[in-house]
Amino acid sequence: MALCRAAAADGITSIVATPHVLRENWINDDEGVRDELVLKLNTLLGGKPAILPGCEYWFSAEVLDLLGPQGDEGAMGATGPVTRLNRSRYLLVEFPAGQVMESAEAVFHELSVLDIVPVIAHPERNMVLSRDPERLARLMERGALSQVTAASVLGEFGARAQHATEEFLRLGLVSVIASDSHSVKVRPPRMTAAREKVRKHWGAEVEQALFVANPEAIVRSAPLPWPAA
């Protein structure tokens, strides 16, 4: 509740709740339990901000089985552990900090065949992608998007993550900027400050696209409006 209210104070009107799923100690494989928590938060907050369902999926080729071709809810049906962002066609995917699996490009291609768009969480904090923007570009060529953390824009994850963020922005490899907030005291929402910096250094069009237009398209399951095709 405190974190949601801090987010609202930072100008955030909607939050996609993205608990870790199938990652190490955070299994969280019961979608029904997560949905109950989303409903409870929305009831307590009165929709300010609005809380939307989602998850942060720990990358594995198993996702093709979890989201297979048997209907919109995938091979495991509505009881599966993976929740796309607001149940759209977009799925937030996280790689280990020091690794990008060799299977990723093939898996992302297969997801695109299923009309599912992987959104790579915080690539600027991944040691492989931060050092090799071309690797990120290849993943995006296979249909992926990239989601950079607002605090990385501000340098709060260190110089390497900030440099990678700036390089990704220069190369057009950022699709959306998100808070990735974890608590009020540790990693609080930093969206307003990040928006101001992006607007100052990369312009109002980029700022509006990465903080408003593209995120809105994702939760509506619509094509991203920026960059224009």
Image (cartoon, grey):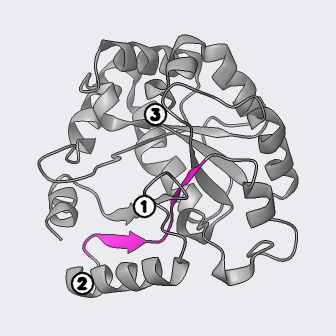
User: Could you say which disc has been placed on residue 46 in the image?
Assistant: 2
Left or right: residue 209 compared with residue 114: left
Q: Mark 3 or 2, which is nearer the eye?
A: 2
Mark 3 or 2 closer to N-term?
Answer: 2
On the image, numbered disc 1 is attached to which residue? 19
For badge 3, the amino acid type reads Glu
Using the image as rendered, state which of residue 88 and residue 182 is in the foreground.
182
Residue 28 coordinates in the image, percent (x, y): 48, 68
On the image, numbered disc 3 is attached to which residue? 205
Q: Is residue 225 visible?
A: no
Q: Magenta segment, which residues?
A: 48-58
**Residue beneath the point at 24% across and 84% down:** 46
Left or right: residue 149 compared with residue 141: left
**Residue beneath the point at 43% across and 56% down:** 25
**Residue beneath the point at 23% across and 47% down:** 189
Using the image as rendered, state which of residue 21 and residue 110 is in the foreground.
21
